[in-house]
């Protein structure tokens, strides 16, 4: 980010912007950050996006459009345009409140009815409108619910080039995201056909699905594979539920717009099978998958570094385990030898006792033999 941040500072200084760009060690000087109002940037880390964000939050919350010429100029610059039409009202107060919350994402304007293009017709005033996708839509409190939720949903175009950051932002809308996963560099019929099908559904069936679905395409399957912990073959279509990490895959090939509409209806009525989720089993699977992916990516990018990072700890652990196991074995050997020696000493003692008993026995036999000889001599003398 630092080189991009330096470019932002240079450009904004050259533009004469009132916004000051700086940097500081927040771990040491966090208490120096003071202010009544702060906006946290959550957009892409590019120079143009950061400058646009700074200019947006530095200006007024609601920017007036005093003329048709100004309206046309602003409409050309912004793909999505929110406009309040009318005088003072509770709806305007709510609009200002929502603008203070969502100014980090989009611009908010106000205009009188005579400034609007001729093709715009309003059922009543005051009104909040969004101009996008070549047309306009009017906020209806009864159908669209809370104004903040409606603006948060409608701040995206009907069809998007989806990437990881866009998916992260779409998580706040509560919508399901229908994506054609293709290779932008591949101009084959299958890749272009799936992209066209999603575009047609987003355009022609907007009134049916725009409250529940966001449509778009994604270039390549690397990010989607890591998200689903699966290996999708492109081109394909996947519908993501970013709120609970569930996803839906069609059970057959999508050949036409009608097939895609049927697939979406199956999801809405609950007949399509949901996969993934954020349950305990899926969380364990995610931990294992992330660990495996990290190890594989490290070894692919730098095999030598991978061997050092994972080989050294494993080697140390192996040596420790070997030392522990070997120490226990040697202790058992010593104990066994000690027991064997003690047993041998006992055997020797027993053998000694047996020899003493044998000697005593032999001694008795010897004493008895001498007595018999003496008695024999006496008897012989008596005979004589």
Image: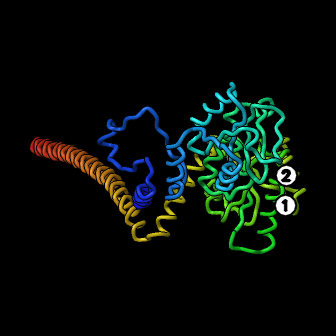
Residue 358: percent from the left, percent from the top? 22, 47
361 sits to left or right of 71: left
Quadrant of residue 346 in the image?
top left
Disc 1/disc 2 C-alpha distance (Å): 9 Å
- SS at circle 1: loop
Residue depicted at x 57% and y 38%: 61
Q: Alpha-carbon neighbours of circle 2 within 10 Å: few (<14), some, or many (≥20)?
A: many
Residue depicted at x 67% and y 30%: 92
Residue 53: percent from the left, percent from the top? 53, 49
Residue 148: percent from the left, percent from the top? 66, 34
In the picture, the quarter occupied by the N terminus is bottom left
Q: Is residue 201 at all visible to an observer of this figure? A: yes
Residue depicted at x 69% and y 51%: 69
Which one is in front, 182 or 293? Answer: 182
- SS at circle 2: helix
Which one is in front, 220 or 62? Answer: 62
Q: Residue furthest right?
A: 258
Asked if residue 2 is positioned above or below residue 206 in the image, the reply reads below
In the picture, the quarter occupied by the C terminus is top left
Name the residue beneath numbered marker 1: 254
Q: Alpha-carbon neighbours of circle 1 within 10 Å: few (<14), some, or many (≥20)?
A: some
Quadrant of residue 175 in the image?
top right
Residue 158: percent from the left, percent from the top? 75, 51
277 sits to left or right of 39: right
Q: Is residue 275 at all visible to an observer of this figure? A: no
135 sits to left or right of 104: right
- Determine whether label 1 and label 2 are within 8 Å by CB: yes
Name the residue beneath numbered marker 2: 263
């Amino acid at each position: 980010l630092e080189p991009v941040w330096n470019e932002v500072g240079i450009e904004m200084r050259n533009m004469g912007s009132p916004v000051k760009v700086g940097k500081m060690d927040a771990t040491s000087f966090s208490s120096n950050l003071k202010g009544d109002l702060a906006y946290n940037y959550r957009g892409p880390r590019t120079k143009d996006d950061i400058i646009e964000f700074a200019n947006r939050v530095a200006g007024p919350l609601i920017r007036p459009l005093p003329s048709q010429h100004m309206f046309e100029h602003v409409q050309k610059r912004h793909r999505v345009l929110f406009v309040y039409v009318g005088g003072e009202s509770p709806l305007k107060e709510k609009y200002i409140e929502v603008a203070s919350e969502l100014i980090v994402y989009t611009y908010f304007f106000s205009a009188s009815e005579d400034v609007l293009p001729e093709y715009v017709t309003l059922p009543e005033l005051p009104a909040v409108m969004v101009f996008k996708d070549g047309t306009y839509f009017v906020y209806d409190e009864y159908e669209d619910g809370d104004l903040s939720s409606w603006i948060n949903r409608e701040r995206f175009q009907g069809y998007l080039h989806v990437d990881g950051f866009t998916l992260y932002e779409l998580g706040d809308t509560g919508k399901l995201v229908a994506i054609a996963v293709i290779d932008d560099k591949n101009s084959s019929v299958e890749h272009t056909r799936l992209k066209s099908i999603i575009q047609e559904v987003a355009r022609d069936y907007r009134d049916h699905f725009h409250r529940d679905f966001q449509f778009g395409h994604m270039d390549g399957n690397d990010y989607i594979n890591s998200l689903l912990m699966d290996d999708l073959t492109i081109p394909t279509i996947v519908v993501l539920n970013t709120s609970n990490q569930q996803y839906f895959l069609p059970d057959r090939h999508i050949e036409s717009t009608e097939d895609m509409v049927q697939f979406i209806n199956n999801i809405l009525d609950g007949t399509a099978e949901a996969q993934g989720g954020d349950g305990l089993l899926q969380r364990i699977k995610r931990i294992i998958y992330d660990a495996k992916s990290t190890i594989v990516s490290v070894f692919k990018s730098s095999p030598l570094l991978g061997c050092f990072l994972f080989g050294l700890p494993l080697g140390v652990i192996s040596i420790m385990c070997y030392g522990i196991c070997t120490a226990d074995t040697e202790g058992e050997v010593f104990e066994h030898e000690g027991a064997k020696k003690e047993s041998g000493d006992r055997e020797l003692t027993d053998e000694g006792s047996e020899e003493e008993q044998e000697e005593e026995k032999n001694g008795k036999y010897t004493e008895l033999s001498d007595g018999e000889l003496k008695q024999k001599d006496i008897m012989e003398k008596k005979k004589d």
